[in-house]
Image (spheres, helix red, strand yellow):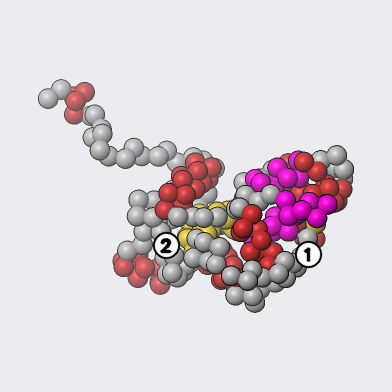
Amino acid sequence: MSAERQTQRDPRQRPERPVRRDARAWAWAVRATPIGPLLLAATDEGLAQVVFHAEEKTAAEAVARLTRRLGAEPMAVSSAVPGSVPSADSGTAATAESADSANSAPVPRCAGHLAEAIRQVESYFAGDTKAFTLSLDWSLTAGFNRRVLRELAAHVPFGTVVGYQDLADRVGEPGAARAVGVAMGSNPLPIVVACHRVVESGGGIGGFGGGLETKRTLLALEGVLPQPLF
């Protein structure tokens, strides 16, 4: 057998992903909620992404995108994130050995942020949490979108709504109401950064990346809309 043939990689093996210099540790989990499964992902900075309708295919696609954006495979989910639903081929499946070692090792910051995000999101859906107090990683948004989302997070509390035009005015861009809608559609942190609270100035419910029924459910949970009869 030639040296060339000896060095060829088995095509059945997954290629090794090069580690980027700016790679960041992160972890993720999927949790069942009244609006369907949510994927939550956190880095050492804080919660970085929330993904609606995170059934298996959607979750796998979201994890692949985050792996590219963050430059590293997610770390193993441990007992620090109880009840997590990892994907078997994502590198997040925890073994009994890893769980045992996690009990004696410090909890990684990303896992701690993830566990706290899960706790507060579950409390929100139970009707107990009215304001999230989470560390957030804003790195998946930038520029105008980040400015608008930060304004929304800071000044539009539980049980209130704001118009697209009003939000544009608040960030000093009165001609950017349509751009505010785009920013809401690209929000990486829905529910926690509550883009469901942004509505049309004329009274319409407006659009929503998670679907209008999800938006109505969230606004009903916050008392803005009546609860559905069935």
Q: Is residue 216 left or right of residue 154?
A: left
Q: What element carries label 2?
A: loop
Which region of the structure is painted magenta?
A: 179-206
Most distant residue in the left direction = 1
Q: Which residue sits at x=64%, y=68%?
A: 228
Q: Which residue sits at x=83%, y=48%?
A: 165
Task: Give the answer, above or below, for where 85 lies relative to 207.
Answer: below
| Nearest to the observer: residue 51 or residue 48 | 51
Q: Is residue 182 magenta?
A: yes
Q: Is mark 1 on a helix, strand or loop?
A: loop
Crowding near pointer 1: few (<14 within 10 Å), some, many (20+)? few
Q: Is residue 183 magenta?
A: yes
Label placed on residue 160: 1
Q: Name the residue under label 2.
A: 85
Where the C terminus falls, by quadrant? bottom right
Report the amino acid beneath label 2.
Val
Q: In this view, does 43 lie to the left or right of 170?
A: left
Crowding near pointer 2: few (<14 within 10 Å), some, many (20+)? some
The CA span between labels 1 and 2 is: 33 Å
